[in-house]
């Protein structure tokens, strides 16, 4: 069994390396340009499928909709996983399959939950799990005056699910940067929300809302307005949805309301370091025309219109 701990940023046991190992350096070749639907054609054990390529997850994943896994006739192996999002627990199954993408075939493990992970395709795949050296997301036509800014990518670890994620440094902390093309607001967890408020100042709207977090699950969030925008690859972020309450606990600490309703207080669990992550949503991504993941070069290039441009 592989268990993911509860919280805003999900951590994964080392055993998931076998479940979702990214493409190896030997398997990577060429460039994939994708957009505007961000889907690719593939096959699992010879059965045709479409996959939504989504750079949201901080792992190199290949997830199928439950209905497609059943249609293909996949029988789960002994390796399964438990994923917790707040108080919600999902049981995932996995199977090693023959996966073909663009005529290239490899034996890879796919996973599925008893739910649909996307309505736009038969499953979801992250760019780090694709067999390409470069993956270019064409978000829209470029606009005159855009600037290209690069962020570093964590190296893809060939025997691990990790790697291939962009990151930046905010107030001396390493913050993972991901993207969701379907969710409008930019989303962050409580630990990162507190980090941003300390660095830039701002306030949190006391009117809560429900935001889709992961795997179609809705969780409580509050909108946070920063006094000074934080720049992520040349993209200025000033309004974010922050997860402020999840069963009283946010990985790896707890969050509580202070007497000041505009303040988030994060209390880290003893001996644990907070996970920092920002998932940029479509509302902010409308200022960018492309995202280019260069796994050989170890960079993410963002072509975006600068603030005030």
Image (cartoon, rainbow, N blue to C red):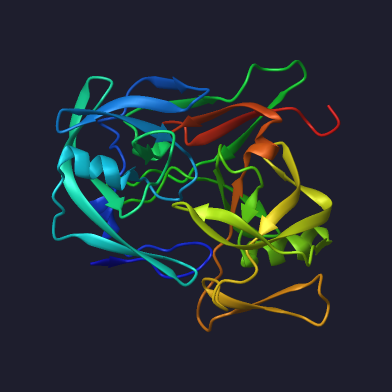
| 127 to the left or right of 303 | left
Q: Position of residue 233 (x, y in %)?
A: 66, 38
Q: Is residue 13 above or below residue 112?
A: below
Q: Is residue 196 visible?
A: yes
For image coordinates 26% across by 30% down, the residue present is 27
For image coordinates 47% across by 72% down, the residue present is 87
| 116 to the left or right of 154 | left
Q: Position of residue 218 (x, y in %)?
A: 54, 58
Depth order, front residue of 163/266:
266
Identify the image quadrant of the C terminus. Answer: top right
The number of numbered badges drawn on the structure is 0
| 163 to the left or right of 44 | right
Q: Quadrant of residue 62?
A: top left
Q: Position of residue 267 (x, y in %)?
A: 63, 80
Q: Quadrant of residue 287?
A: top right
Q: Is residue 230 above or below residue 199?
A: above
For image coordinates 69% across by 38% down, the residue present is 283
Q: Is residue 142 above or below residue 306?
A: above
Q: Is residue 108 visible?
A: no
Q: Is residue 78 above or below residue 159?
A: below
Identify the image quadrant of the N terminus. Answer: bottom left
Q: Position of residue 282 (x, y in %)?
A: 63, 37
For image coordinates 75% across by 15% down, the residue present is 144
């Amino acid at each position: 069994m592989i268990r993911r701990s509860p919280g805003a940023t999900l951590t994964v046991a080392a055993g998931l390396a076998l479940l979702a190992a990214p493409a190896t350096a030997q398997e990577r070749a060429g460039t994939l340009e994708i957009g505007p639907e961000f889907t690719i054609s593939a096959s699992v054990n010879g059965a045709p499928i479409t996959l939504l390529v989504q750079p949201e997850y901080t792992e190199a994943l290949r997830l199928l909709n439950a209905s497609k896994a059943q249609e293909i006739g996949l029988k789960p192996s002994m390796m399964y996983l438990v994923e917790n999002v707040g108080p919600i627990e999902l049981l995932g199954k996995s199977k090693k399959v023959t996966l073909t993408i663009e005529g290239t075939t490899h034996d890879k493990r796919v996973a599925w939950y008893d739910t649909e992970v996307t309505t736009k395709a038969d499953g979801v795949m992250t760019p780090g799990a694709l067999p390409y050296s470069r993956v270019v997301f064409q978000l829209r036509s470029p606009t005159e005056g855009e600037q290209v800014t690069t962020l570093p990518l964590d190296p893809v670890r060939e025997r691990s699910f990790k790697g291939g994620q962009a990151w930046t440094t905010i107030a001396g902390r390493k913050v993972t940067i991901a993207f969701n093309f379907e969710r409008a607001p930019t989303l962050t967890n409580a630990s990162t929300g507190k980090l941003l408020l300390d660095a830039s100042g701002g306030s949190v709207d006391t009117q809560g809302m429900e935001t889709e977090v992961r795997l179609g699950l809705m969780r409580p969030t509050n909108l946070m307005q920063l006094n000074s925008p934080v720049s992520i690859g040349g993209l200025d972020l000033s309004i974010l949805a922050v997860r402020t309450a999840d069963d009283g606990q946010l990985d790896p600490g707890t969050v509580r309301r202070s007497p000041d309703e505009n303040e988030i207080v994060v209390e880290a669990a003893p001996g644990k370091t907070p996970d920092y992550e920002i998932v940029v949503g479509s509302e902010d991504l409308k200022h960018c025309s492309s995202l280019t993941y260069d796994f050989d070069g170890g960079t993410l290039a963002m072509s975006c219109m600068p603030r005030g441009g």
